[in-house]
Image (cartoon, coloured by chain):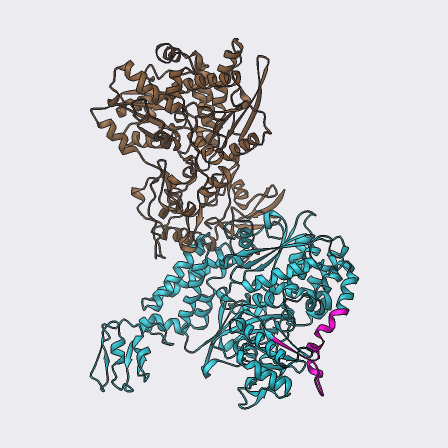
Amino acid sequence: MVSLTINNMPVQVEDGVTILEAARKLNIDIPTLCHLELHDLKMVNQVASCRVCVVEVKGRRNLAPACATQVFEGMEVLTHTPTVIKARRMVVELILSNHPKNCLMCNKSTDCELQNLAASLGIFEIEYVGQMSQHKPEQSSRAISRDMNKCVLCRRCETMCSKVQTVNVLSAMERGFDTVMGTAFNLPMADSTCVNCGQCVAVCPTAALTEVNNISKAWDYLADDGKIVIVQTAPAVRAALGEAFGLPPGTNVTGKMVTALRMLGFNKVFDTDFAADLTIMEEAAELVHRIKHGGTIPMLTSCCPGWVKFIEHQFNDMLDIPSSCKSPQQMFGAIAKTYLTQKLNIPLEKMVLISVMPCLAKKYEASREEHKTPEGVQEVDLVITTRELAKMIKEAGINFASLAESDFDDPMGASTGAGVIFGASGGVLEAALRTAYEWITGQKLEKVDFTSLRGLDGIKEATVKIGDMDVNVAAASGLGNARHLLECVRAGECNYHVIEIMACPGGCIDGGGQPYHHGNIGILQKRTNALYQADRDKPVRKSHENPYIQQLYQEFLGEPYSEKAKELLHTTYTKRELM
Amino acid sequence: MKISTVQDLKNEYQKLASLLALRREEDAVSGKINKREILVCGGTGCMSSDSQEILANLRQEINDAGLQDTVSAHISGCFGFCEKGPIVKIFPDGVFYIEVQPADAREIIDSHIKGNQLVRRLLYEDPANPGLHLARQHEIPFYKKQLRIALRNCGLINPESMEECIAAQGYQALGKCLSEYTPKQVVDIMKASGLRGRGGGGFPTGVKWEAAYVQPMGKKYVVCNADEGDPGAFMDRSILEGDSHSIIEAMAIAAYAIGANEGYVYIRAEYPLAIKRLSKAISDASDWGLLGDNIMNTGFSFNLKLQYGAGAFVCGEETALLRSIEGGRGEPTTKPPFPAQSGLWGYPTVINNVETYANVPPIILRGAEWFSGIGSEKSKGTKVFALAGKINNVGLVEVPMGITLREIIYEIGGGVKNGKAFKAVQTGGPSGGCIDASNIDTRIDYDNLIALGSMMGSGGMIVIDEDNCMVDIAKFYLDFTVDESCGKCTPCRIGNKRLYELLEDLTQGKGTPEHLDKLKTLSQIIKDTALCGLGQTAPNPVLSTMRYFADEYHAHVHDKTCPAKVCTKLLNFVITEACIGCGRCARGCPANCISGELRKMFVIDQAKCIKCGACQDACPKQAVARQ
């Protein structure tokens, strides 16, 4: 333990702790901007580049960045002397002197860390004005929009992209005043190895990186009388949407969300969880097929489009490993635009399918060439994120928190507990095990909770006894962890049968399209808990027991992994270069 | 040749020492000279003035004259007197020829070597006594007050000869450390010597080594910072070009002291000659068994690699340099942890600059006490300065700490060029400051320079005369740091840019009294908050010029004039009575704002004048004045 004083108040902290952390023990929140520490996700952005958190340390000739300065025995820290206050304000003023002032018209307005910081420091005037950066906004990506004029060079995106996700798309380029976060050779994001996971967006303090905004397109569809607009909502959306309306994190708002979607004008409100159950049917069948016919083992899940693009670039020698199953979003689209059009008697050209996703990569996934119906129509027409849905609900003046609950529409609104846990890391695997167990053994699985596969750990492993067989499974979330597992598989050192991978740390609950956590990682655990609670609350908890799924196979698809199922619900992967 | 024991190394020295005998006899020559050696400067500066051709011609003449057995010609490292290069020096008579041309080779051989007659026209003429030619190096004022420790072998040995390196006691200090001292004792010697880092900060070298020494055993690194980036400074390049082995030897000593086995030299790719000579030296030292595994069978191993820098100034900052070696973007990281605790790839690392290392072998051989006897109370030893700017003797000088600015500028440097008035001297490069005439008797050491608002830096020393505008000078340096900022931290990336813009306003006549307050306030906050040394010291040129030349700032702001007549926006170009009416000014004017009749005085229309100065350049009678 180390003893020090902060503002003349004694405090004892562990060795190696920073001034910032020590001050929190005394209820002093030293303002920060670039700093971001997501403990459970092992993400630390400690570049000390913004210099907002400077404090005085006795005996030191200049001010110290509290976020990156470790305490020492006898240290004397002062956090709000006139020198500190003046320096801190000046640093923020300098940042603002090179930042657009159109906050009123900014995507991040009221959700911007820089805006909040300026407000909390009471900055009403900028004395030092001068040249401002003139970067062109970059809109090539289907998922991520870049406006580098709003970048404060906190480098969080770089840390996330390089250290956590190991994708290495964004890094600092040029120097001095021209420094800018960019791609190698300034390639458009769409041509880079970006996997569209949107974790850079999730940690960006300003609107330098945001989702590609599809709100106005969604309104246009809803206003078009010639269209029948249906919506699917991903599992993780319901666990986070309430945060945008002041509800406590972890509140399951499924019923309110359905009500709100109807109020917005969607003709039918369905659940991607239904397609998650369908995915389990196909994936479990594919696994059984692979085991029986000597196919490639391990089999990797393929629900996550960020992860799919990652393997296409980074491990393009291993494209036979992922399951050929489309993701639930695309399976939903494939069924909606074939089976559902018949069932509800909606002409294909009139049907518009909008997805509400916690994810930015889903925007990209929906646009992939191979995701078309046999008639050549895109399976999913538009993807909006949880954040965009929240904005639409606000725009429509709907008092979300007070809404009554209502149910999804049939037939694609019914789901099991297995479908809802797709939104958390380990959930797909757990859902698959519930079905695979019963299919392989022919016996009823009594204990459906595979708790060792739950939680925010980056890599989780389990060995499950299914009949006489020990099935080794692993779940990785975060692409750095995925890389670790894949390298292990490539080297032949891992003996897994099934691996679940989610690009975002913690799974879809931490997707790039979810309400901003602003570093409060406790929120993620609460969202996760909400999904497992929803699972427990479901009367049916195994995908193959979903009566509407059974009906779908009886009426339309035949058997799981049938030719028809393969045509509609399975896909192929593209070998992409690592630049 | 393979040296397999420390005793071998000593024996080899005894055997080879005679190689330099002629060159060491310099002062003891009398009577007839039978054997001679000619050294031709092979530094980058003299080589770009054809010194290789001089050498080739000299060798041709020697051959043609049949003198191969008694006369030889070699290259050497830089002599430092770059103003007067190319330099050719003849031993043992110690005659120092300047500004030699390739065509002079014949006369040197015919007259000096064969005829024992000095070539008078190639000798240095004392400006104080016109007509007095000084033949010997040590008679020339430029060299009189110099004391060469770091540059001891530059201009003495052939830098590409391993034998001459050994003859100059090369690697004897390493041998001494390996055979007589424990690592702790080496650290203690360095601490006792008082040597401080020559790269800029002036941190005590021994303390740095100790900090790495006390780290737990395991992988450690030794790094040489040869990323010399201060504009005008070239002492590190000269040392590497003239005496690479001293750096290799010193790095091996440092490695032994801290327990490292691997080292890197981070060297600018723009230094091809230094790279070539250093690479050869590494290869020779490895061949001789003085680098590599189990050196001289002592159990100590040391391997050295080169890493090229791409010319970013900030990579001279030690943490940025380490990131660059690791393959990352050259950006500084927060200290602590210091490199000695967590450096290259997270391992304890000692990083010193070239000149610092060059002092190490003499300290080991001659003792800490000898070294600490030189210099001032808190700054021991010597410092190499690169003299430049408005000074007569541009070049590299090594002087004891504690010498005054006046001695360097007037005695060694020969005073201000063209008889102009001395205005200031800028020390420490872009991070340093300007010191005015009232402080010219200050004794130079780390602490005195900092007290004056400047710093030692890597030893750039640029003389500024009455024709320089101090606001413009401050702007010039800030332009450099703004350009070279890595862009990582806010105060440097944006703050220094804003400082520059304020200065720009001043030089364009847009300055207000508020500008001056803003300059001071922002400068202080940048010093307090920037992440690395580059950012923290960038405002020094502004603060120091504001401190010593407040009247010039005042004139720019209040009178909208530039007293030195540099800032063109604050000037009017006026045609004076000396005009002969030739009309060249009018023809050269891009704004077509000069009119007049031939043979009568021309007039500039001030309303249209864009103040480009083309008229002044075009006028044959210097009739265009800046007012």
Q: Position of residue B285 (x, y in %)?
A: 68, 60
Q: Which residues are magenta?
A: B14-39
Residue B421 in the image: above or below residue A142: below
Q: Is B552 left, or right, of A458 in this rendering?
A: left
Q: Position of residue B589 (x, y in %)?
A: 26, 74
Q: Position of residue A543 (x, y in %)?
A: 44, 15
Q: Is B401 left, or right, of B618 in this rendering?
A: right
Q: Indicate the quadrant containing the N terminus of chain B: top left, top right, bottom left or bottom right.
A: bottom right
Q: Is residue B627 visible?
A: no
Residue A255 in the image: above or below residue A72: above
In the image, the chain rendered in cyan is B
Q: Nearer the viewer, residue A544 or B213?
A: A544
Q: Nearer the viewer, residue A385 or B111?
A: B111
Residue B499 image-quadrant placement:
bottom left
Residue B620 in the image: above or below residue A561: below
**Residue at the image point whose x is 64% and y is 85% from the top:** B114
Identify the colour of chain A in the image.
brown
Residue B303 in the image: above or below residue A248: below
Look at the image and say whether residue B593 sits in the magenta stretch.
Answer: no
Q: Is B372 left, or right, of B588 in this rendering?
A: right
**Residue at the image point whose x is 66% and y is 80% from the top:** B67
Q: Position of residue B251 (x, y in %)?
A: 66, 59
